[in-house]
Amino acid sequence: MTEDNAEEYEFDEEALAEAYEKALALEKAGDIEGAAEGWREVLRLDPADHGGAAVRLAALGRGDTPPKAPDAYVATLFDQHAEMFDAILVDQLGYHVPEMVRDILGECAPKHSLPGTFSRLLDLGCGTGLAGEYLHDRCDHLTGVDLAETMIEMTDEREVYDDLYVGEAVAFLEASLEEGDEPWDLVVATDVLPYLGGIEAFIAGAAAVTAPGGLFAFSSETLSDETLAGRPYMVGPKQRFAHSGAYVREVLAANGFDCLEQRPIVVRYEDGEAVPGHLVLARAG
């Protein structure tokens, strides 16, 4: 298991915590302008944005949509919830996307002449290794990548993956290409797009490391056409990115992927409401 060297960043933790709690309280109270000013103060105190202030501002309609969720925010979020991650995501939020990936591979095998087993699996945003649990019996070698070190430590305990890396997905893909790594014939990303706005670099990176004829399976969240209002993506009310289905297909096609399936799914439940999305299966040209 290897780890990227993250750049150290210092900030006044006490002042930041106070500003964060104030902004959050104002948002919960419905004071949108006050909350927006509060989140701007959080961002001023912590430009690396461990608290995801930029994403919250966009969700409130008081800030530009960032190109993605800040790396510091994603790593902090998942490190904080690592111990209870599976219980929260699966048991409380009804998240079953890794299981859906396994099922779609089996269901689509005869329809699209897909293989039943794979030599090399790359799991981007592997989290605690849920996808590996569902797919390891179909793959000879499994590689997992995640921004959160604590997640990778928990994944390692499953003893399912052969290689694990701490790192940002696009940076990993670019490094893999530069180093001339052997391509993967199955790439999965079961909860990555909700933390990305523009997906061009991510899809291009996946295309570069996927073997010809290899498969790329991933999930995305979406919103109604009325809410998206012609935008390819936006930050939704729960501070996660939603993408239009057409935008996802366009970027796949631009990078040589044949979109075999784009199924509407319920990604998870939040506050008792279904979060809509898509399960996508694409084949590299």
Image (cartoon, rainbow, N blue to C red):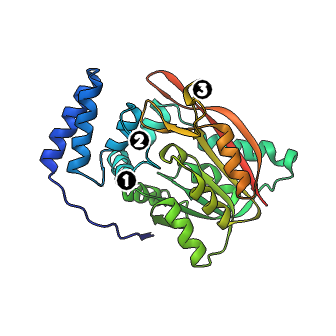
Image-quadrant location for residue 138? bottom right
Of the numbered discs in the image, which one, if any, rests on residue 224?
3
Of residues 262 and 166, which is closer to you in this image? 262
List x then y, in percent, for residue 51.
30, 45
Between the residue at mark 2 and the residue at mark 3, the CA separation in whole angstroms equals: 20 Å
List x then y, in percent, for residue 142.
60, 63
Between the residue at mark 2 and the residue at mark 1, the CA separation in whole angstroms equals: 22 Å
Q: Amino acid at mark 1?
A: Ala
Residue 17 visible here: yes
Q: Amino acid at mark 2?
A: Asp
Residue 162 visible here: no
Of the numbered discs in the image, which one, if any, rests on residue 64?
2
What residue is drawn where x is 60% and y is 73%?
A: 177
What residue is drawn where x is 31% and y is 67%?
A: 7
Look at mark 1 in the image and give the residue it sits on: 75
List x then y, in percent, for residue 202.
57, 57
What residue is drawn where x is 50% and y is 36%?
A: 90
Between the residue at mark 3 and the residue at mark 1, the CA separation in whole angstroms equals: 29 Å
